[in-house]
Image (tube, grey):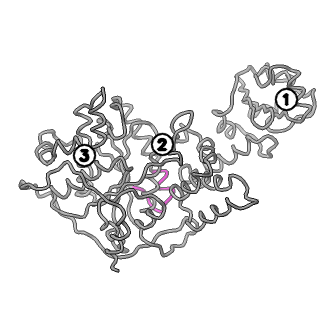
Amino acid sequence: MTTTTAAAAAFSTRTLLLFSPFKTSCKFPKLPSSFSSFPIKTTTTTWCYSSSSSASVRRSNVIEILQQRGLIESLTSPNLHDAVSSTTTPVKVYCGFDPTAQSLHLGNLLGLVVLSWFHRCGHTPVALIGGATARVGDPSGKSLERPDLDLDTLRRNTLGIHAIITNILSSNSDSDSVVLNNYDWWKEVKLLDFLKNVGRYARVGTMMAKESVKKRLESEQGMSYTEFTYQLLQGYDFLHLFQNEGVTVQIGGSDQWGNITAGTELIRKILQVDGAYGLTFPLLLKSDGTKFGKSEDGAIWLSASMLSPYKFYQYFFSVPDLDVVKFLKMLTFLELEEIGELESEMGKSGYVPNTAQRRLAEEVTRFVHGEEGLREAIKATKALRPGAETKLDWKTIEGIAEDVPSCSLEYDQVLNIPLVELSVNAGLFESKSAARRLLKQGGLYLNNSRVDGEDKRIEAEDIVDGKVVLLSAGKKNKVLVRIS
C-alpha cells in the first residue's frame, strides 16, 4: 500500500463535506503580480521528539500522532498526511486567537497543544492574534453578538495574550515562537478592494447555510452584517499567510470548520493553486458531554495573574477517573505506552487514588506555567494540608488566598491574642468552647502546625512575613487572617 493510499485508508471512516462560500466555477480577473503560487511539498517521514527524553525518536508523522491521541476531528484533505511528512521541508501551521479577554482560557489550550505537536515534529508553528477580527467577533458557537471592545482594551488584551502564547510555545521548544497580529495587514485593506478581490467569490446562500449563522438568524437577536462577514475575514487571513508567510496549514476547533474551509477555497480560487490544508480538533468534552474548562467560579484562565498555578493545578487534579485517561492523551505529551500503564494501574488493587490525576495536573501545569509555576502549585498544595512540613511564606499563601475565606484585622488585634479567641474573631469557630474542644482533639492548626496548648498566644513570628496568619480547623476548614 502506498503512503498516499495508507493515508486515505486511515481516514476512510470519516466523511468530509466541504461547504465553501465561494463559487465552484468562475472566470478569474487578472491578478496583481504579488499573487504568487506555492509548490506542493510531499515526501515521506519525519522526526518527532518525546516529552520524556531529550533524544529524538523515530515516530509516525504528526497527523498519525494527533489521530492516535484523539486530536483530529476533520481534515480538508488526506493529502495533508504526505504534506507534513517531509524531513527536509517543514510546513508552517497556524492557529488564530482573538483577544476578547486579557488571557486565553482552557478552551484555547488544545490549539497550543496541537501547535506544539507540529513543532515537536519539526514544523513551524505560527500563532495569529486577531487584533482586527476581534473588532468584529466570531459568531461561531455564540448566541449573542460579542460586546464591542474599545481600542485600549484590545491593546491590553493583545499584549496579555501575546505574552501567554510566547511563554508557552517558547518554553516548550528550543526555538522562538512566531506570533503575528492580523491588524498589521487589515489596517491597509480598503473596503472596495476587498469587495472586488474577495467578496465577488462569496456565495451568500452558502454563507447563510453555515450552522452558526442559521442558528443566529432563527433567534430573536438575529445577526448583524458585521458578524456575518467574519468567515470572509478569517478566510482572507489564511490567504494572506499562505501568500506572504508560506503558511500552508490552518488548525482550529471543530466549530471553526466553516471559517477554515473558507480560507482553503479562497486560496484555491484566487491564487489558483492547491496545497492549503485545514485541520480541526474536537471540543474538549467530559464524559457526560459537557464542556471541560469551566468551574463554579468561571473560566479556567491560562494567565497566572487571573488564575493562580495552584488553582489551575487543582482543577486538573479533580478530574474524574472516567475522563483522566482521555485528557492525558489529549493535553499532555506523555508517551501513549506510559498513559496505558497508568490506565492499567487504575484497575488494580493497591492503586493510590488520584495518581493519574496528579500526573495530568503536573504535566499540564508545567506546559502552561513552566517548572516554576508547577513548583509553586505543588508547594501551595502541600501548604494547604494541615501538618505538612512545608514552611509557609507570603508567596505560597498568596497562591491559595483566593480559595480560602479571609478576614482583615489590625496588628494589635492579632499579636498576643489567645489562639482560641483569634479563631472565633476570625470566624473559624462560632464559640470558644468549640475551638477548645477541637484543640483538645488535635484538630486546630496555626500556619499548618498543630497546636496542643490552650494557652497558646499569637507571637510576632507566627505572623507570616508580618502579613498573614493561616488558621485551620481539621483538614478542610481554614481562615486566612490578613494584617491590615
Indicate which disc residue 459 carries.
Answer: 1
Toward which corner of the image does residue 147 lie, by quadrant?
top left
In the shown orientation, is residue 328 left or right of residue 183?
Answer: right
Secondary structure at numbered mark 1: loop
Q: Which residues are magenta?
A: 166-177
Expressed as whole percent of the image width and height from the top left, the position of residue 172 reads 51, 58
Residue type highlighted by circle 1: Glu
User: Mark 1 or mark 3: which comes first in sequence?
Assistant: 3
Toward which corner of the image does residue 336 lie, by quadrant?
bottom right
Q: Give the spatial CA distance, label 1 vs label 2.
A: 42 Å
Q: Residue at x 37, y 40 (%)?
A: 141
Q: Give the spatial CA distance, label 3 vs label 2.
A: 26 Å
- The residue carrying mark 2 is 105
Residue type highlighted by circle 3: Trp
User: Mark 1 or mark 2: which comes first in sequence?
Assistant: 2
Expressed as whole percent of the image width and height from the top left, the position of residue 103 reads 46, 40
Q: Comparing marks 1 and 2, which lies closer to the viewer? A: 2
Within-10-Å neighbours for mark 1: few <14, some 14–19, many 20+: few
